[in-house]
Amino acid sequence: MSNAKETNATQKSPLVGVIMGSDSDLKVMQEAAHILKEFHIPFELTIVSAHRTPMRMVEYASTAAGRGLKVIIAGAGGAAHLPGMVASLSTLPVIGVPIKSSNSINGWDSMLSILQMPNGVPVATVALDAAKNAGIIAAQIIGTFDETVSKTISNYKLQLEQSVIEKAKNVSNDWQNDFDEK
Ligand code: RP5
């Protein structure tokens, strides 16, 4: 039996900070917000630019844990320094979302800027534009101490499994029908 307590997920104060370097990142980063909302996890979402608002980034990252956040999701594209710099300034786990932005060559620049962190300052990096997965990882982190969130994730995984089993049945039936007709 789990010892996790049913705590913060029903509270209003945000547990997850979703930040991005520009409003042009929102079309990707909103996927993290959607899944957190679906999981009933309180979050905040804002723009923090490592290059254009460096002092805001320092303020945000250095106060995040004290404000009650448990995990930060940071998305950026091109010379994507936001996730790494936030990780350097905070004790919270940081999930990085590389974005194929207008200033990105082909996405690899964003990927490598976030992925290739030095030892001691990790950023948990998801796939290119994979903000939904970043939201799911954040939820899983919250689920380690919140039983309600943990159950929500279990149900989500069950639904995923059922949808694949349903598709497998359909594919098998369709294929068998096609095969029988020939
Ligand atoms: C990065 O530069 C941002 O995270 C964004 O992905 C990219 C382009 O920003 P905009 O020029 O669209 O504001 O810092």
Image: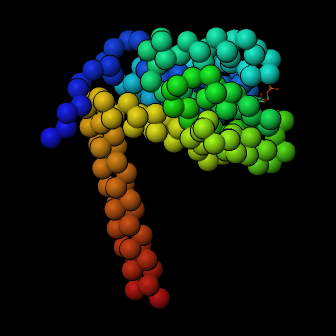
Residue 31 in view, yes or no = no
Q: Residue furthest front?
A: 120
Q: What residue appears at the point 62 percent right and 22 percent down from the top-left corner?
A: 89
Q: Where is residue 117 drawn, in percent x and y?
A: 68, 41
29 left or right, relative to 92: right
Q: Is residue 142 among what the camera can see?
A: yes
Q: Is residue 86 left or right of residue 112?
A: left
In percent of the image, x 75 and y 34: which residue is there?
80
Tag count in the figure?
0
Q: Position of residue 62 (x, y in %)?
A: 59, 15
Q: Residue at position x 52%, y 25% from top?
A: 91
View quadrant of ligand 1? top right
Image height of 172 relative to 53, above or below: below
The answer to whether 4 appears left or right of 19 in the picture is: left
Where does the image place residue 67, in percent across and percent down from the top left? 47, 11
Q: Is residue 162 above or below residue 45?
A: below
Q: Quadrant of residue 171?
A: bottom left
Quarter of the picture containing the N terminus is top left
- Name the residue nearer the viewer: 120 or 41: 120
* In the image, farthest residue toward the left: 1
